[in-house]
Amino acid sequence: MTAETLHSYLGRVTDQNLLRPGMLRDLSKGRGFATTLSTLTGYSKRHLVFSLPELRTPASLRAYPQLAGEVSSCAGKRPACQQCVAARLGTDDCVTVFASHEQLICPTHSRWLGNGSLKCPRPHQFSIAACPEIIAANLQHKRIISRWGRGPTHASFLDAVTCLSRWSRWPVVMTASDIRGRWERLDITDESPPLSPAEIAAWYPNAVSLTRVILAQRREIKTARGMTRNIATASVERLRREVVEGLATSGAFDPYRYAITSDRIEPDSEVEAPARPRHSPAATDNQQT
């Protein structure tokens, strides 16, 4: 499976080949394990490096520049789509993969998978086919990344999730027509556990909208070199108009105000960066002369 964790893959290879438990994990601690694993499995080293992020080294990233933009081992972990595993591997094994923060759904099978932060255990994966707006929101999420950059979008999405998690059982949110409609289609009731995977999926489109608003408001504040009365008023209006109709927040501990005014630490890169070229000593000497 693409972007599978090494622990998951070695466990599957061990079980399928009746190997001594722990043998491959012991071998993985040595140098040149990618070559060893290639010999044991019959897969080319290139195939393994593309499939298993933890096998990648600076040298392999230089050798295969196509890896730039692929999910890295810095991303969160979640179970792979059960239906993808069954189709590709012919098994119902639990396969764990690295997934970037926006890889919350399986677009092929229209299923909610969660991500490293918004957990969705494998038995709880569910269909979102009845909620095409969730799939549309995921496409919008990817467009936001393209426009604003992965790091800023990831940080702002985490802020948006914090906000919606706190607001999710506020009456104005629970009764919002779009969210309530998704509750009905995903079989969520007032008695359902708060912040279940299905409830998170129901407000995910709103979280994507809030991510875009946070990014835009932060830019306005930065351009103005600080919060102004006009920006504060506009930020509240955008929240009501673009995220949840009628929603109003205030107070010293308002997570929305904190999100748009605080300096954010962008999470580690979830995808492989373009490899830096190796500078030869000769080239360095020439630059100095």
Image (cartoon, helix red, strand yellow):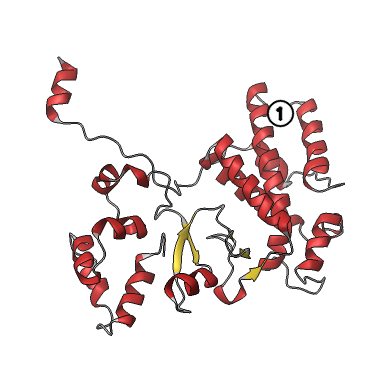
Residue 124 shown left or right of residue 62 in the figure: right
Q: Position of residue 67 (x, y in %)?
A: 36, 47
Residue at horizontal 50 percent and vertical 53 percent from the top: 100
Q: How many marks?
A: 1
Give the amino acid at mark 1: Met
Residue at horizontal 66 percent and vertical 55 percent from the top: 135
**Would you place residue 267 above or below residue 173 in this image?**
above
What residue did someone put label 1 on?
227
Residue 207 shown left or right of residue 54 in the figure: right
Q: Is residue 131 visible?
A: yes
Q: Secondary structure at mark 1?
A: loop
* Residue ranking furthest to the top: 289
Q: Position of residue 130 (x, y in %)?
A: 74, 64
Residue 91 shown left or right of residue 176 in the figure: left
Q: Quadrant of residue 126?
A: bottom right
Q: Position of residue 192 (x, y in %)?
A: 76, 73
Q: Quadrant of residue 17?
A: bottom left
**Would you place residue 157 above or below residue 28 in this image?**
above
Quadrant housing the C terminus = top left
Q: Residues within 10 Å of mark 1 (few under 14, many from 20)?
A: some
Q: Position of residue 37 (x, y in %)?
A: 23, 67
Q: Nearer the viewer, residue 254 or 60?
A: 60
Residue at horizontal 39 percent and vertical 55 percent from the top: 73
Q: Nearer the viewer, residue 51 or 195?
A: 51
